[in-house]
Image (cartoon, grey):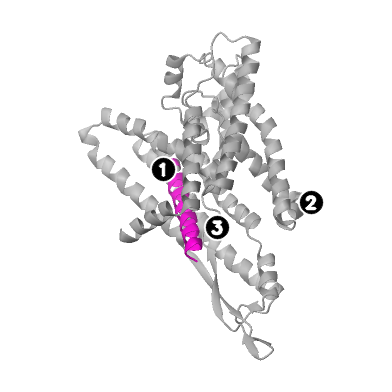
Amino acid sequence: MQNFLKKIKLVWTDHSLRKKILFVLLSLVAFRLLASIPIPGIDTLELDRFLTNNQFFGILNIFSGGGLSNLSIIMLGVGPYITSSIIMQLLTIMVPALKKLYHEEGELGKKKFTQYSRILTVPLAAIQGFSLLAILEGQKILVNLTLFDRVTNLIIVVAGSMLLMWIGELISEFGIGNGVSLLIFAGIIAGIPSHVSQLIFTFDVSQIPLYILFIAVGALVVAGVVVVTEAERPIPVTYAKRVRGMKMYGGGSTYLPLRVNQAGVIPIIFALSILLFPQMIGNFLAGSTNAVVMKISHALVSFSQTGLLYAVLYFILVFLFTYFYTAVTFDPEALSTNLQKNGAFIPGIRPGASTSAYISKVLNRITMMGAIFLGVIAILPLIMRAMTGITAIALGGTALLIVVSVVLDLIKKVDAQISMREY
């Protein structure tokens, strides 16, 4: 506790760090203000009825940072930008020029890569915005709209999504932490008071053992996420001795820390983004009068977190995206080259290709453990929901996973900033 208070004091007394944190807080306040401005033509009573126990829009609301619950101007949230990032990172595997741009051309290359992601976000936001508005109009939530109203609403929600993307990038650049993750985190936290009040109003004494079970499972999930996120596999590294003039340099030993879960919460966000597409298509087709289209719509909507297939696909996607994101962000060959250039080697392993192969082997093994754990944690709320029949659990589990991961990442970055100031 004393160490925590000391860190708080260091954060507040350091001008640069205090400025960054205040910038993040002001950005989040602006984000919440934008989330309270609704688009025109909403039937609020119909909206409340539609959102009650609607799992698809509940998850979509997480990605909008809470902006979908009242159909605000930022109702699309950072979803289009996340989808754009997924597509661009997939393309790095298939397009050598993009891979070279991202991995080999340094900071300038990554800036160009990010710019391409921003450009791709615009058409994706337009497609998602049109689909979502059509679904809401089909459900009689948006009423009495003219063609001009529809076009205006589409422009507003696309502009809102781009504005939110810009706010997220400003947080990443001038604040602390990942801006997109913090916006999702803020939306989840903002919804806690309403969830707590709902639990209080629907409190049932006979359900106390069930409440205790949920709290215990929640605590285990938090502890598990913390342990796996912090877990590292150290690889020993030795620096060769070098003689320059009359002095000897190097000869020290250190270690290379490989995290068990290099990808953090990104695989969960990626997997959910992919799984939202069939549900959105199903909701979009729900207004059709054609019998075949209605059957397809029903099948796609019923797929939404109701069966074993959904849980299996969710687990597989989380598992694959953990490996994929680790492969994109961590390059064993570049690490091996840097070690060789600095006169460092892993004891018992030849420098160069052998070192790269060894690091890849270790990384694949520990990533498998991290991917399995992340997949199990992701589908655990679905298992709990199947056992208890309470719909909100699956949503709460996803939100809990995101919140814990974002908080851990933020704490690490604040600690890094404090350490830099001390040095």
Position in image of residue 127 (x %, y %): 66, 27
The answer to the question of whether label 1 and label 2 lie on touching residues, with beta carbons closer than 8 A, is no
Q: Nearer the viewer, residue 111 or 22?
A: 22
Residue 381, which numbered label? 1
Among the 4 quarters of the image, the one containing residue 124: top right
Identify the residue position indicated by label 3 in the image. Answer: 262
Instruction: Give amino acid for label 3.
Output: Gln
Q: Earlier in the sequence, mark 1 or mark 2?
A: 2
> Is 198 on the left-hand or right-hand side of 397?
left
Measured Cα–Cα span from mark 3 to mark 2: 25 Å
Label 3 crowd bin: few (<14), some (14–19), many (20+), radius 10 Å? many
Identify the residue position indicated by label 2 in the image. Answer: 97
Q: Is residue 168 magenta?
A: no
Instruction: Give amino acid for label 1.
Output: Pro
Evaluate whether residue 308 shows in this view: no
Q: Earlier in the sequence, mark 3 or mark 2?
A: 2
Position in image of residue 375 (x %, y %): 50, 50
Measured Cα–Cα span from mark 1 to mark 2: 41 Å
For the record, the magenta segment spans 399-423
> Is 356 on the left-hand or right-hand side of 261?
right
Q: Where is 187 relative to 320, above or below?
A: above
Q: What's the residue at 68%, 32% (across, down)?
A: 122
Q: Nearer the viewer, residue 112 or 170?
A: 170
Closest to the camera, between mark 3 and mark 1, is: 3
Position in image of residue 96 (x %, y %): 78, 53
Magenta segment, prevailing SS (helix, strand or loop):
helix
Label 1 crowd bin: few (<14), some (14–19), many (20+), radius 10 Å? many
Residue 13, which numbered label? none
Q: Is residue 405 magenta?
A: yes
Evaluate whether residue 7 shows in this view: yes
